[in-house]
């Protein structure tokens, strides 16, 4: 019999007793029973069950009952905690009743043993079998004695109530069987539906490093391109003592930016979910962690970083993740600290329609307008767009007329742009 069933039965008994008390009071007062006026809803009132049954009710009700009946007092906090713990470990209620009755205080109270003979018997059986190394058997026998005593108390409450309890118990058992069967089907379905990667993640990580080596450019070429951010590093990276990191570079890749800012006297840490990338950074002497960018940012104290940067990462992120990265970047930055995110420039038609899709992991191009507003929305000011890496002059269409200049601007203009913003600066945007 589960506690839920027992609690439901107790609630029903109390409600029926309340209705009976109301009807009796009405009759004694010369009135009519409550239902005579069409009111069929019983109004629960506090009632006291017979002789405080041992076996019916919650654990706390049992403890209160056994203290009152066997020790003639209310349960104290220490005793309540002790017996709660024993009940939680599965100790029989009858065994506990026997222990209390045979305790020094129980002997002094002198309640006749005949009133708790089942409890004393259960305690003795449990103790003897425990000494014989049969503790499990003793516990099982005690639980059966508990069930028998509970049934006896329920029978005393009325045959109809006992039948209803038996019916509820049977229904609950049937429901448990049904739920168990559904659980097995759900587990089987989960196994069937759980996606299995056709290629191990480390294989994709290695591919991506090879892809960058073949398409992004050599280390020397990348360092040369980064020179356009020289003044940004010196002017916009917060120079404060006590910072945890001068620069946090999310999606650090092969570590060219870590080298760049390190050569300019800034302490930098790179984070990347690609272990092959972070291993390459560590091999080159950089401080790098293989960890999800958002997880790392959320681990940092507020105001502990001079700058947060990310090169060719925001175009890989779903919007809700990018939103959270910008939000966390603002939180971790010290006052006056800045962000810099570089990404392919969709203002260049060839980039937006063609070269952007060389990378299978790109999600969608990010426009300068969109990322500028996102930074402004999160409180960044002094927002600036830095465009870089135009196509070489020989790739342009020959001609000096305005139409040719416009065509060249759309086809051969900057292939990348970076958005920068500063925490605590006025919210102006420079396009």
Image (spheres, rainbow, N blue to C red):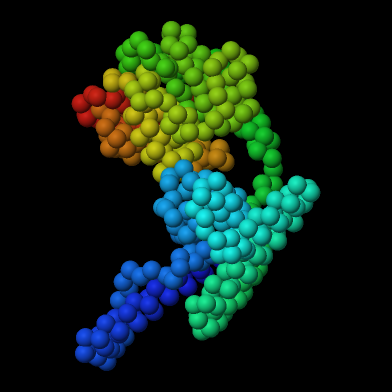
Identify which residue, 81 or 317, lies in the foreground. 81
The answer to which quarter of the image holds residue 176 is bottom right
User: Could you tell me how many numbered marks the image carries?
Assistant: 0
The answer to which quarter of the image holds residue 398 is top left
* Residue 4 visible, this orientation: no
Q: Position of residue 109 (x, y in %)?
A: 49, 53
Please tell me which residue is depicted at 38% across the width and 77% down the height of the picture.
Answer: 17
Horizontal relation, residue 137 to residue 262: left or right:
right
Q: Quadrant of the N terminus?
A: bottom right
Please tell me which residue is depicted at 38% across the width and 15% down the height of the picture.
Answer: 243
Horizontal relation, residue 359 to residue 372: left or right:
right
Identify which residue, 422 or 365, lies in the foreground. 422
Judge whether 315 appears above or below 99 on screen. Answer: above
Q: Position of residue 383 (x, y in %)?
A: 28, 28
Identify which residue, 112 or 117, lies in the foreground. 112
Q: Position of residue 265 (x, y in %)?
A: 43, 7
Q: Position of residue 110 (x, y in %)?
A: 52, 55
Please tell me which residue is depicted at 56% across the width and 32% down the height of the picture.
Answer: 273
Identify which residue, 50 or 3, lies in the foreground. 50
Please tell me which residue is depicted at 51% across the width and 40% down the height of the picture.
Answer: 362
Q: Quadrant of the C terminus?
A: top left
Name the outermost residue toward the right. Answer: 132
Judge whether 83 appears above or below 422 on screen. Answer: below
* Residue 259 visible, this orientation: yes
Horizontal relation, residue 61 to residue 173: left or right:
left
Judge whether 170 appears above or below 54 on screen. Answer: below
């Amino acid at each position: 019999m589960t506690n839920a069933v027992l609690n439901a039965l107790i609630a029903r008994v109390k409600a029926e007793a309340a209705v009976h008390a109301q009807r009796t009071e009405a009759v004694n007062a010369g009135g009519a029973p409550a239902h005579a006026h069409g009111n069929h809803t019983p109004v629960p009132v506090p009632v006291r069950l017979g002789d405080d049954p041992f076996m019916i009710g919650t654990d706390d009700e049992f403890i209160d009952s056994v203290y009152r009946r066997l020790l003639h007092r209310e349960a104290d906090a220490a005793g309540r905690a002790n017996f709660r713990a024993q009940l939680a470990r599965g100790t029989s209620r009858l065994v506990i009743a026997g222990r209390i009755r045979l305790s020094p205080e129980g002997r002094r109270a002198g309640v006749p043993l005949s009133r708790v003979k089942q409890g004393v018997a259960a305690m003795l059986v449990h103790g003897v079998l425990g000494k014989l190394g049969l503790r499990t058997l003793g516990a099982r026998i005690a639980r059966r004695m508990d069930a028998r005593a509970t049934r006896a108390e329920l029978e005393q409450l009325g045959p109809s109530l006992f039948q209803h309890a038996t019916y509820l118990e049977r229904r609950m058992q049937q429901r448990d069987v049904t739920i168990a069967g559904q659980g097995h089907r759900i587990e089987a379905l989960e196994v069937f539906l759980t996606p299995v990667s056709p290629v191990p993640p480390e294989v994709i990580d290695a591919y991506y490093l090879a892809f960058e080596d073949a398409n992004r450019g050599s280390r020397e070429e990348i360092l040369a391109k980064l020179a356009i951010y020289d003044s940004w590093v010196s002017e916009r990276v917060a120079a404060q003592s006590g910072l945890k990191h001068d620069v946090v570079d999310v999606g650090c890749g092969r570590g060219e930016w870590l080298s760049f800012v390190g050569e300019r006297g800034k302490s930098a840490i790179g984070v990347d979910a690609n272990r092959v990338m972070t291993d390459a950074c560590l091999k080159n002497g950089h401080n790098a962690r293989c960890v999800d960018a958002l997880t790392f940012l959320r681990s940092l104290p507020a105001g502990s970083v001079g700058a947060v940067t990310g090169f060719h990462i925001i175009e890989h992120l779903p919007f809700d993740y990018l939103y959270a990265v910008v939000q966390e970047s603002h939180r971790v930055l010290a006052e006056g600290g800045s962000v810099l995110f570089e990404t392919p420039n969709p203002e260049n038609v060839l980039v937006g329609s063609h070269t952007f899709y060389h990378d299978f992991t790109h999600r969608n191009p990010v426009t300068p307008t969109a990322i500028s507003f996102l930074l402004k929305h999160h409180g960044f000011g002094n927002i600036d767009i830095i465009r870089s890496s135009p196509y070489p002059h020989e790739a342009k269409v020959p001609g000096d007329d305005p139409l040719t200049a416009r065509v060249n601007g759309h086809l051969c203009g900057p292939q990348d742009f970076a958005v920068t913003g500063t925490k605590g600066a006025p919210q102006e945007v420079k396009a």
